[in-house]
Image (cartoon, rainbow, N blue to C red):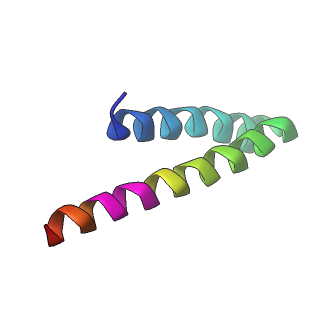
Amino acid sequence: MSIIAKLKDLVGSAEVDAAKFYEKGNSAAGTRLRKALQEIKSVAQEIRQDVTAKKKA
């Protein structure tokens, strides 16, 4: 799986959990949302490092 596809999947799952948390008050979805956001952050950091490396090459 490409890193962009992984990022899209993470954002999609976070969107579903965000809707459950904010619209229905599901606190377990809030926990899943925070976990997904943390994963998105690390994938975004990985993409940033890759872009910087390719830019300097």
Q: Nearer the viewer, residue 20 or 36?
A: 36
- Magenta-span inclusion, residue 49: yes
On-image quarter of the C terminus: bottom left
Q: Is residue 15 magenta?
A: no
Compare residues 50 and 34 and report the one nearer the observer: 50
Residue shown at the point (59%, 48%) measured from the top left? 39
Q: In percent of the image, x 72 and y 34: which residue is there?
A: 20
Point out residue 15 in the picture as x, y percentages from the top left corner.
56, 38
Please state which of residues 13 and 19 is positioned toward the viewer in this rendering. 13
Please report the bounds of the magenta region as a residue range: 45-50
- Classify the position of the N terminus by image quarter: top left
Which quarter of the figure has residue 33? top right
Position above or below: 12 against 35: above
Q: Does residue 57 appear to the left or right of 52 in the view shown?
A: left
Picture quadrant where residue 51 is located = bottom left
The image shows residue 54 at horizontal and vertical percentages of: 18, 61
Q: Residue furthest top?
A: 1
Magenta part, dominant SS: helix
Look at 42% across and 56% down and name the residue there: 46
Residue depicted at 43% across the width and 41% down the height = 7
